Amino acid sequence: MTSSQRTPEPHGHTHSHGPAAPVSRHLRKVIAAVLIPFATAVLVGVALLWPGGTPAHERTGVGFDRQTQQGKVTKVVRVDCKEVNAAQVPPTGDTSTPEGREAVNAQQGTCARATVEVTTGPDKGRTFTEIVQPDAPRQLEEGQGVVVAYAPDAPRDLQYSVTDVDRGIPMAVLAAIFALAVVVVGRMRGVMALIALAVSFLVLTFFILPAILQGSNPLVVAVVGASAIMLIALYMCHGLSARTSVAVLGTLISLLLIGLLGSLFIGWASLTGNTDDYTGLIHGLYPDIDMSGLLLAGVIIGSLGVLDDVTVTQTSAVWELHQADPSMGPRALYRAAIRIGRDHIASVVNTLVLAYAGAALPLLLLFSIAQSSVGTVANSELVAQEIVRTLVGSIGLVASVPVTTALAALVVSADRPGSQPRTSRGGRRRRAK
């Protein structure tokens, strides 16, 4: 075949890939010798740590730890705020305190008196009244679905109150649009990705969270649970192949690095993990839970999703480069694929930092309003734990690129070409002896 007859095979940076080229039986045995013990250890860990359900506790009635039912706003009447908030005004009329000024302001304007019907639970059909201030961030409308909190120890007239609106329908529609988009674009691979996503949520809901609440070490639970999610998701989405196995190994090494760095810096920075009302409530209900360990578990689980993306992409890049030019050795493959990885590092790290900054935007606004210095903001535990979470996760992501690329280059170059079909000069494939 002349040079003009050769058709170059394009390759590039892509998150999807076609069927992996087969590898030799020897190489498959080497990979299996590494992954089978690892998968066995994960299964044993899941069996030993299996919680058997979330432990019961007496509800405190605080925050999310409240009994809730569904409700519906049946009627909304506009009334003068003086009529419904007269009892809130301090007897002295003192407005020098924030509470006094708030009570006086509550008498001004037009309030909404909403009649709410409980639609689920033992008190289905029962109604109660909810007063909504004109400046309240959440206004109620007739026919609107709501979530109501139930306080059994309160007086009968005060047992029910509106705690949130019912967002079930818009959330379900958005989830359906997401699933449709994934299936239309990804086709069968998109279907497998959705199944893997569902399995990940099942592992998180029925294993990781209950096991932590049962008192198991959060770090050990996170490592075992994240490993199970990684094995299921990667092999389910990308197939049982040597290429996927290399991505699994690269992800595992990066997760171990994140765990070590996270443990070191969380301890060094004296981060307790108990920084807000939610973590405080968890610590109050389950005082035996290691909150700093829970923080580290969150770092590991949060980094797993992006790690999967990086390791699969890098492994695919090496395989495609090898198929395009089988004469390339491991060094040449590494140098070519690492150039792709550098572009990926730049985009992924920026994405991770902006994702954490976006989640903490209200907190950053509070510090800006208080005109706090950068050093003061970074030193506060609430921000420091997010900095540690972001930087440790980013270091793991950066490290995953050369680690996975080197593994893939070594594995694909170590394959024995003599066991694979090759093309003769006449263009016919024959089996090498």
Image (cartoon, rainbow, N blue to C red):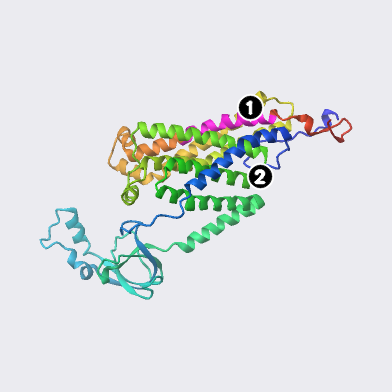
Vertical position of residue 373 compared to residue 201: above or below = above
Q: Main secondary structure of the magenta part?
A: helix
View extreme (bottom): residue: 125
Q: For mark 1, does the 10 Å Cα neighbourhood hold few (<14), some (14 to 19), or many (20 or more) residues? A: many
Q: Is residue 330 visible?
A: yes
Q: Is residue 302 visible?
A: no
Q: Check disc 1 and report its element: helix, strand or loop.
A: helix
Q: Which residue is mark 2?
A: 239
Residue 399 is a magenta residue = yes
Give residue 126's position: percent from left, percent from top.
Answer: 34, 75
Q: Residue at x 23, y 67 (%)?
A: 81
Q: Which residue is mark 1?
A: 334
In front: 217, or 161? 217
Q: Quadrant of the C terminus?
A: top right
Q: Quadrant of the N terminus?
A: top right
Residue range (magenta): 393-412
